[in-house]
Image (tube, grey):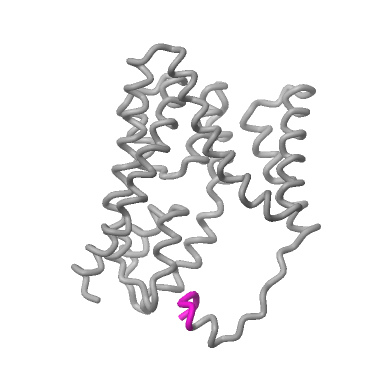
Amino acid sequence: MNNKRAFQKGMRDGIPIGLGYLAVSFSLGITARNIGLTPFQGFLVSFLNNASAGEYAGFTVIATDGAYMEIVFITLITNIRYLLMSCALSQKFLPGTSFIHRFIIGYDTTDELFGITIAQPGYLNPYYTYGAMLLAIPGWSLGTAIGVMAGTALPQRIVGALSVALFGMFIAIIIPPARKNKIIAGLVVISFLSSYCFTRFSNLSEGSKTIILTAVISALAALLFPVKQTGETDSEIKNSGEIL
C-alpha cells in the first residue's frame, strides 16, 4: 500500500475516533474551566498531552495547588501504559524506518490509535497512523477548548452537571473488565476504599495520594495475581499480525 492510500485509510478509520474524542474532551474542558484555564490553555494542554486520565489527574493536582513535581509524577504514572504500547508498536515498523516517523507516532500513541494501528497486517506504514492522527488530535484539542468556552457561557448548575460526564467515562472504562474478572473487581473496590481512607484520615494532597495508591495497589496486584501467558504458536502469532 502506497503512502497516499495508507493515509486515506487512516483518515477513514480515524473518523469515529475523532468524533469520540470531541465528545469526551468536551467534559474534560468543563473540568479545565473549573480550575481557571482559558480555552487556549485547554486546547494547548490537550494538544500536547492526548490522554484523558493523565490530563484529568494533572487538573486535579492544579486545582489543589500541588507542586510541579506532583504533576510530573501523577502524569507519568497515569500515562505509563503508553510506554508499553510504544514498545509494541516499535515491532511493527519496517527495519530502517527513520527516527522522525517513530517520534511522531510515539507522540500520539493513545489507546484507540494504538488499537487500530497494531491491528494492521504486516509492517506499519506510518502514513496510516498519520491519517488517523489528523482527525484524532484536532478532535481532542478542539473538544477541550469548546468545553472550556461552554463552561464559561453556561449556567453553573449545568456546568456542574456536565462535569459528571467525565466520571461517567471512567466508570465506563472500569465496569466492563470488572464484570469479567473478579480480581479486577476486587481491586477496584479496594482502590475506592483506600482512596476514601486516605482522604478521611490523612493530610496528603490529592496528587500524592493518587501516586502512592496507584503505585502500591498496582505493584501488589502484579505480585499476587500475575497474568498468565497464553501458549500461542509462532505461526499463530505471525498470522495474527502481532509479531513480524
Q: Which SS does the magenta portion mostly show?
A: loop
Q: Which image quarter: residue 60?
A: top right
What span is colored magenta in the figure?
239-244
Q: Which image quarter: residue 29?
A: top left
Q: Is residue 209 above or below residue 47?
A: above
Residue displayed at 39% across by 12% down: 155
Q: Observer-nearest residue: 227 or 156?
A: 156
Is 123 positioned to the left or the right of 211 in the image? left
In the image, residue 56 lies at what x, y percent? 51, 34
Q: Is residue 97 above or below residue 190?
A: below
In the image, residue 36 lies at what x, y percent? 42, 19
Is 148 positioned to the left or the right of 226 in the image? left
Toward the bottom, the furthest residue is 235
Is 125 positioned to the left or the right of 106 in the image? left
Is 213 positioned to the left or the right of 111 in the image? right
**Does the segment drawn in magenta span residue 164?**
no
Toward the left, the furthest residue is 4
